[in-house]
Image (spheres, rainbow, N blue to C red):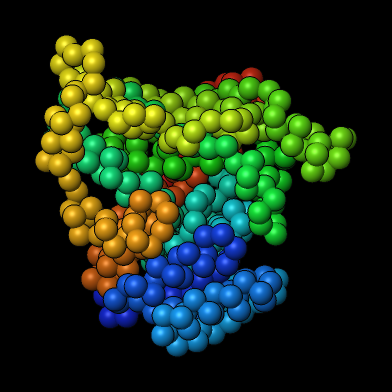
Amino acid sequence: MSVLGLRREPIENVRVGFIGLGMRGPKAVERFTHLEHATVVALCDKYPEPVAKTQEILSSHGCSPAATFTGDNGWKRLCEMDGLDLVYVTAPWQMHAQIGIYAMECGKNVALEVPAATTVEECWGLVETAERTRMHCMMLENSCYDDFELSCLLMARDGVFGEIVHAEGGYCHNLSAYWDKYRDDWSMRFSVEHRGDVYPTHGLGPLCQLLDIPRKDKLSYLVSMDSGAFAGSAVASSRYGSSRTFANGDITSTLIRTVSGRSILLQHSVMTPQPYSRLYRIYGTKGYANKYPVPGFVFGEGKEFLPEAQASALLEKYRHPFQDCLQHAGMALDGHDGIDFIMDYRLVECLHKGLPLDMDVYDAATWSSIIELSERSIQGGSVPIPIPDFYR
C-alpha cells in the first residue's frame, strides 16, 4: 500500500537517536538541542571517541546524557532500543539503506543523509519496507530548503517562469581538502570503484520539487557521460599506490528526460579546482533563473539579468514562510546558510504535528537511483537507461 502523503499519530516529543558521528552527525546533534519538540536520547558510532565528544555537546547545552552504542553492530542495538521515535543516520553512504530498512523494521521512523541508497535494489528495499511497516523514511536533502530554490519554487507554482522546459542542477565542489580530514575515506573509495554521478541528490532534489515530480510529471530515462579520470587517477595513485586505478571520471554529465518531455541536466565534479556550485538553472517559456555563480532572472524578451533591485524585490515577494520563520536562527547554527536547521525543524515539526513529510521514501529512492543508473549508462556507452517508477 502506498505511503505517499503518509500521516502518523502526532508525537509530543520526538526522541531521536543518531548513528554516525563523523562530520555531519555532531553538527546535527548540536542543531537538535535547539529544537523545542525533540530530545536526543541515543548516540552511536563505530568508534568510542566521537560518541564521547558528541556527548559533551549535549552536556554543554544542559541536556541529559544519551544512551551510547559503539562497535560494528552498535547501530543495530540503537535501532532496537525502546523509547525511540526517529533514527537519524549520518553514517557512510554504503550503510544508509541497510540501517534505514532495519530501523523501519524495528518500528522507527528514519531520516537518512544523502544519498539514501547507492543501488536500485536498495532503493526498492527502502520503498517496500516503508510501505510494509507504514513508517516514515526521509532523505535529508538540505538543498531543498535553500533560499533561492524555495523562492523559485513559489514563483514556478505562480506561473512566473511559464512552462518550465529545462532545468539544471549538480554538485560541483573541489573536495581535495576533505579526503584526509576524516578517519574513513569511504566517499573516495566509492569513486575508486564506481563510475557515474555518485552524489546526484543536491542537484536533482530541488528540481524534482520545482517540476512537481511525481504529481505533475515523472522521470522517464537518462543518458550519462563522463570525462577521463585525470585528476582522480593522480589522487588514487598518491593515496593507494601507483597500481590502483580510479573508475570515476573527473566530471560526469547526466541528461534526464521526463514523461511530459522536459529535460534535466545534472553534473558531478569534485576533483578539479572550481568554486562551489549546485548549478541551479531554470529555463521556462516566460523566464529564466540562475543561482551560480551570480543569482539573477531574465523575463520576456530580455537578454540581460534584471537589475539587482528588481531581482531583490522579486525574491522578497516570493519569500517562503520557512525563510521568514527560521533563517536567522538557522544561520547561527550551521555553515549552510541555515538550510540544515530549517530541514531539521521541518522534520520534527511534521512528526510533532502528524503531517506528511516534505520529502518521502519515493523521493529518496528516485533521486538516489541516479547513482547506479548513470553508471549503467556510461558502462553501456552512454546508452539510455529507464528510471524506475518508485511512486508506482
Can you give x and y, in whole percent of width and height, for residue 371 in the image?
A: 56, 39
Quadrant containing the C terminus is: top left
Residue 4 to residue 297: above or below: below
Can you give x and y, in whole percent of width and height, for residue 91 in the image?
A: 58, 61
Nearest the camera: 135 or 138?
138
Quadrant containing the N terminus is: bottom left
Residue 271 to residue 383: above or below: below
Nearest the camera: 7 or 161?
161
Residue displayed at 33% across by 23% down: 166
Total numbered circles: 0
Can residue 278 be seen here? The reply is yes
Nearest the camera: 9 or 237?
237
Can you give x and y, in whole percent of width and height, for residue 128 in the image?
A: 47, 57
Image side of residue 49 versus residue 205, left or right:
right
Residue displayed at 57% across by 28% down: 252
Residue displayed at 33% across by 32% down: 291
Can residue 361 be seen here? The reply is no
Can you give x and y, in whole percent of width and height, for residue 32 in the image?
A: 39, 71
Instruction: Place residue 11 in its image quadrant.
Output: bottom left
Residue 260 to residue 370: above or below: above
Residue displayed at 23% across by 21% down: 305
Image side of residue 25 versus residue 184, left or right:
left
Image side of residue 322 versus residue 340, left or right:
left
Instruction: Place residue 389 in its image quadrant.
Output: top left
